[in-house]
Amino acid sequence: KIDRALDTLVQEMESGLPVLSSWYPLGIDLFLDLHFGSVEHPEYVRRYFNRVFSATSNIDGVCNLPDADREYIQAGYCEAQQVLDYIQEQIDLVVTADDDTTILYWWAQAGLPPDTMIQEVVHNVLAMSQWSNVIFLMLASRIGVVPVVDMDHMGITGTKVDFF
């Protein structure tokens, strides 16, 4: 799943498009597929994860959400309960199907109860900026760029690549 996503990003770069033009929708798909499996996810779930992903992903790896957005994401909004219910349904489906291509499967194998898995999914959503940084480091490696991590700014320096 990650290889397919990286291949798509490389193709975008080779066609002259900035990586970020594809990363947000691709990142959402990758996140959902890694956690819940490769199924068609409802629009309200995609909309929720798009909002969170857009708010927490940025180039310096620091989550600088305005208080209103932070409260919106943490406390939820009109579809938050639907999203939580969807996560619970996906946990049940993944565990029943023994889908070992998902993170949920391995959490279940480790003995995590469903309520803890829900908390972990929410935690992973809020950590998407760090997750994006790892994907970009993997992408840099794939295209032959030797990334240098700038610890003062938590960014990638080195050979210029048009990520943004």
Image (spheres, rainbow, N blue to C red):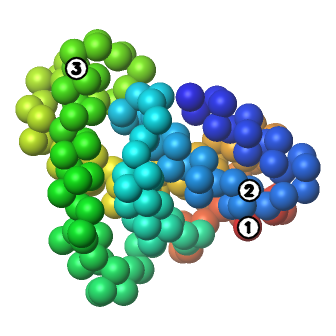
Sequence-wise first label, 1 or 2 = 2
Snapshot quadrant of residue 74: bottom left
The residue sitting at 27% across, 33% down in the picture is 90
Q: CA distance from mark 1 to mark 3?
A: 38 Å
Side (left or right) of 141 relative to 40:
right
Position of residue 120 relative to residue 67, above or below, is above
Side (left or right) of 116 relative to 99:
left
Q: Mark on residue 95?
A: 3
Residue type, mark 2 in image:
Val
> Does the image show residue 113?
yes
- In the image, residue 138 lies at what x, y percent? 64, 41
| Residue found farthest to the bottom | 67
Badges 1 and 3: C-beta atoms under 8 Å apart? no
Judging depth in this view, the residue of 161 and 126 nearest the camera is 126
- Helix, strand or loop at label 3? It is helix
Badges 1 and 2: C-beta atoms under 8 Å apart? yes
Judged by depth in the image, the label closer to the viewer, 1 or 3, is 3
Sequence-wise first label, 2 or 3 = 2
Sequence-wise first label, 1 or 3 = 3
Judging depth in this view, the residue of 42 and 76 nearest the camera is 42
- In the image, residue 14 lies at what x, y percent? 89, 46
Snapshot quadrant of residue 104: top left
Residue type, mark 3 in image:
Val
- Helix, strand or loop at label 1? It is loop
Q: Mark on residue 19?
A: 2
**Which quadrant is the N terminus positioned in?**
top right
> Does the image show residue 74?
no
- Helix, strand or loop at label 2? It is loop
Position of residue 133 relative to residue 51, above or below, is above
Dot 1 corresponds to which residue? 164
Residue type, mark 1 in image:
Phe
